[in-house]
Amino acid sequence: VTGLQPRPRDQVEIVTVGDEILLGATLDANAAFLARELAAAGFQVRRKTTLPDDLPALRQGLREVRARGGVVIVTGGLGPTPDDLTRHALAEVFARPLTTRPELVAVLEERFRAFGVAHLPRVNLSQAELPEGASAIPNRRGSAAGILLEDGESTFYALPGVPAEMRTMFREEVLPRLRERAGGGLVPVRQRLLRTAGIGESVLAERIADLVRGRDVPRVAYLPDLGSVDVRLSVAGLPPEEADAAIAGLEGALTERLAEWVYGRDDDTLEGAAGAALAARGLRLAIAESCTGGLVSSLVTDVPGSSGWFAGAVVAYDDAVKRDLLGVSGDTLARFGAVSRETCAEMLRGARTRFGTACAVAVTGIAGPGGGTAAKPVGLVHLGVDVEGDVRLEVRRWPGTRREIKARAARTALLLLLRAVEARPA
Amino acid sequence: VTGLQPRPRDQVEIVTVGDEILLGATLDANAAFLARELAAAGFQVRRKTTLPDDLPALRQGLREVRARGGVVIVTGGLGPTPDDLTRHALAEVFARPLTTRPELVAVLEERFRAFGVAHLPRVNLSQAELPEGASAIPNRRGSAAGILLEDGESTFYALPGVPAEMRTMFREEVLPRLRERAGGGLVPVRQRLLRTAGIGESVLAERIADLVRGRDVPRVAYLPDLGSVDVRLSVAGLPPEEADAAIAGLEGALTERLAEWVYGRDDDTLEGAAGAALAARGLRLAIAESCTGGLVSSLVTDVPGSSGWFAGAVVAYDDAVKRDLLGVSGDTLARFGAVSRETCAEMLRGARTRFGTACAVAVTGIAGPGGGTAAKPVGLVHLGVDVEGDVRLEVRRWPGTRREIKARAARTALLLLLRAVEARPA
C-alpha cells in the first residue's frame, strides 16, 4: 500500500556455507529461520547466497558480498574439522590474520571438562582462533563461538551451522545488536500463523475462498505439512497498529469458519494444546498405540512438564500385547481383527484401567507397506479417545508412506483428544 | 591425490527468484532438487543465489551471475502476475528487448481452450514474450514456457517456480541439452556416507585425523546430527572406477578405525540396522522407556517389517507405571530413585518378562528442563540392553534441550542394542 523505500540499514544479506546444501542433501533451513526472524524484526533480506566448503570459492563469494556493503549473516563452516573454512576465508577477505584467543581456549576447556573430557581435543583449538580485530559471539550451547567482523562498509556476523546453536546465538546475541544499530523506526513484517489439523490444504482453501479472494492485505499463504495446514497472514510495510488490525480482522473470520480444525496460533503445537487443556482440568492421560508405534507418546512427552498430566503408554505392536497388557479380549481380536473399531474401544478401556487415568487415547491401523488387504487396506486407522467416559471412535484412511501415515494418525489422535477435553468444563 | 581443476563446463550456478524464500516462508526445495539432479549427472553446483521479486535487485543480481560466466539455472518469476519479473530482468541484463512470439500465443490459447476458457486472459499474454534471440523451453504441465538465453560467455535456462513444472522441464528439456553441450566425459560426483552414532564430531575427527590429513581425494565432510555423525567421502572429477577405488580404500580404513561407532552406510538407519541384526538371529525386542517417552519405540516402528521382531513397549513416565507394569520394586525406586542404574536394570528385566522377549532396551533419565538436581542433573540418562541375558548398563550425560536429550538417548540406546545383538552368533 505504500511505496516506502527501505533504508539500507534495514537490509541484510544471508550467506550459508556448505557443500551439503549445494549437493541438495540438506534443505537450507538455517537460511529460512534467519529470514523469518529478520522479517519479523523489520529487516529486509535482499539476497541469500550459498557457497561451497572450498577456500578459493568461499573467499571469492564473501569478497563479492562484502563489496555490496551492509549487514551480512553467515552460517556454517565454524566447526572444528578441516572442511570448516569460514574463519579462514573471512580472515583473508578482511586481510586480518587469525590469532588464538586465550579467553576462548579457556571457555572450550571448561566446556569439555564439564562433560568429562579432561583434555581439549587438538582439533577444537582452531575454534579459539579469530581474525584480528574481530569479536567473539558467545555460544552457550556448543563449542563454536561466532565471529563479529566489521569495517566502514560492511558488518559480518558469522555463526555456526548447527541449528540449535545458531538459533540461540542469533536471537540472544545478533538480533539485539542489529536492532541497536538500526536505531529504531523499523517496520516489521507482522504475521500470524493459524494452525489447523485434520483438514487438507485444498478443502481448507475452498472453505475460506470467499473470505480471502481479491485481498492484498493481509497476504495469505498456505503451508501444508503431514496432517496439518498452517495459514499464514502477513502484512509488510504498514505501521504495526494498522497491520495488526488488518490481521486481527481476517484472523477472526478465518478462526470462526475453521473452528473445527484450528488448534492454535504461531508457535502452538497440537500436543501442547492438548496438554494445556488436560492440565487446566486436572485430568491425566494414558495412551494405547499400535500402528503409530510410540509416536503419539513421543509427541506428548516433547511438551515440557508433560509428566504432570501424562502417566504412560503401552505400545501394543503384537496382538498378544493388546491382550495381555491392555486386556483386549481374544474373542474380539479373533472376530473383528486387531485393526477394528471394537479392538480400538477395548484398547481405550484397557489403557484407562491399566494406568488408572481419567483419559485415554487409542490408535490401531495399518501403516504399511505390507499387511494391507482389500477389506483393510494400508492407511486404514481406527482412532479413539475417552475423556471421563465421553468415548469417541473414528476411522480414517490416508495415503502415503509408513512414516506419513504414522504422522497423520498421531496428529489426528491428538486433535480428537483436544476436542474431547475442551468439551469438559475447565 | 590429483589437483584436477574441474572444467568450467561442469560448473553450474543456481538462482531462485522469490520473496517467499527470502521471507523464510518457503524452504528452497527447487534449488535442492536441481542440486541433486545436477550432482548425479556430473555437474558441480558452485553457488546458489536467491533474489527478490524486485526489478532493480533482480537485474543487479543476474548481472553479477552473468559476469561469472558459465551455465546458470534460474527458477521462479515466470508466472503471469505483476510480481513475476524474471523475463524482464533477463531482457535488460542481456539488452535484448521482449517480443511477443505468435507460436507461444497459439500454445497458450490452445491450453486455455482445453480447460474450457474461450479467451486467453490478458495477463497470460506476457507469458508469450521472450527476449530477442532467446528460445522457448516447452512446458507441457503449465502455462509458463521457459527461456533459453545465451551469449559467448554464459547460458541461462530460466524455468518456472512451480515444482512439478520445473522438475519435468528440467529433466526433459534442460538436462539433455546440458549433457549434449558438455560433450560427454562428464563425471558424476561419487559418494559414500559412513554412518556413526555414540561419538561426538570432534572426538571422531581426532580419531581419524592421521588417515584424513592432507588428503584431497576423497574429500571428507563431517555431518553431525543429534547423537550421530555421518562422514561423507566424495570424489568429483575422476572416472567412476578411480573414484570408487579411492572411496573404498579410505572407507575400509575408517570403518576399521571407527568400528565401535559405525552402524551403516548411505541410507542405512540405526533402527534398521538393529532390526536387521535381531531378525537375522530370530530375536524379539521389548522396550521400557521413561525419559525418551516413546521415541525409541517410534524409531523402531519406522522400520518396515518391524512387527516381525518388535513386540511392544511400555512408556513408564509415572513411577507407579514403572512399578505396576514393569515390576520395578518400590524399594529400588525409594532407595535409588527412578533415574538410577538399579531402576534401569529392573525396567529391563520387567520388559523382557512382561513381553516374553529375548531382548529388551530400557531408558530412564532427566530430559528437563525441570526435574534436575545437583546429584542428578538435567541430561543424565541411564541406558540398558539385555540380549539373551547379556546385560549392559551405561550412564551418559548430554547437554541440550528436552528434545535433543530425547534424541541423543534414543540413538545411543539403539547403538547399544545393535552392538549387543551383533555379539551373538547369527
Image: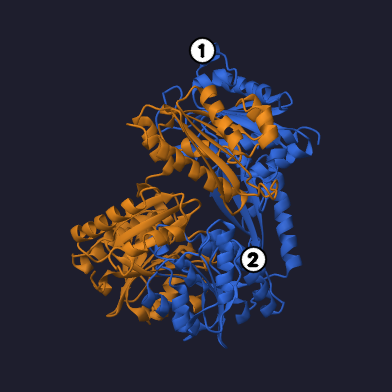
Chain colours: A blue, B orange
Q: Position of residue A321 (x, y in %)?
A: 53, 22
Marks 1/2 same chain = yes
Q: Is residue B58 left or right of residue B400?
A: left
Pointer 1 chain: A
Pointer 2 chain: A
Q: Quadrant of residue B336?
A: top right
Please tell me which residue lies in front, B133 or A130: A130
Q: Residues within 10 Å of mark 1 (few under 14, many from 20)?
A: few
Residue B374 in the image: above or below residue A381: below
Residue at the spot 60% in from the left edge and 81% down from the top edge: A8
The Cα–Cα distance between marks 1 and 2, rounded to whole angstroms, is: 57 Å
Residue at the spot 61% in from the left edge and 68% down from the top edge: A38
In the rendered structure, find residue B388 and report the number of the disc placed on it. none
In the rendered structure, find residue A335 and report the number of the disc placed on it. 1
Q: Give the labeled residue for mark 2.
A: A171
Residue at the spot 46% in from the left edge and 73% down from the top edge: A86
Please tell me which residue lies in front, A320 or A330: A320
Question: Tag 2: residue type?
Answer: Arg
Question: Tag 1: residue type?
Answer: Arg
Q: Position of residue B58 (x, y in %)?
A: 47, 75
Q: Quadrant of residue A26?
A: bottom left
Q: Secondary structure at mark 1?
A: helix
Q: Quadrant of residue B308?
A: top left
Q: Quadrant of the N terminus of chain B?
A: bottom left
Residue A281 in the image: above or below residue A207: above
Q: Secondary structure at mark 2?
A: helix
Q: Is residue B247 left or right of residue A327?
A: left
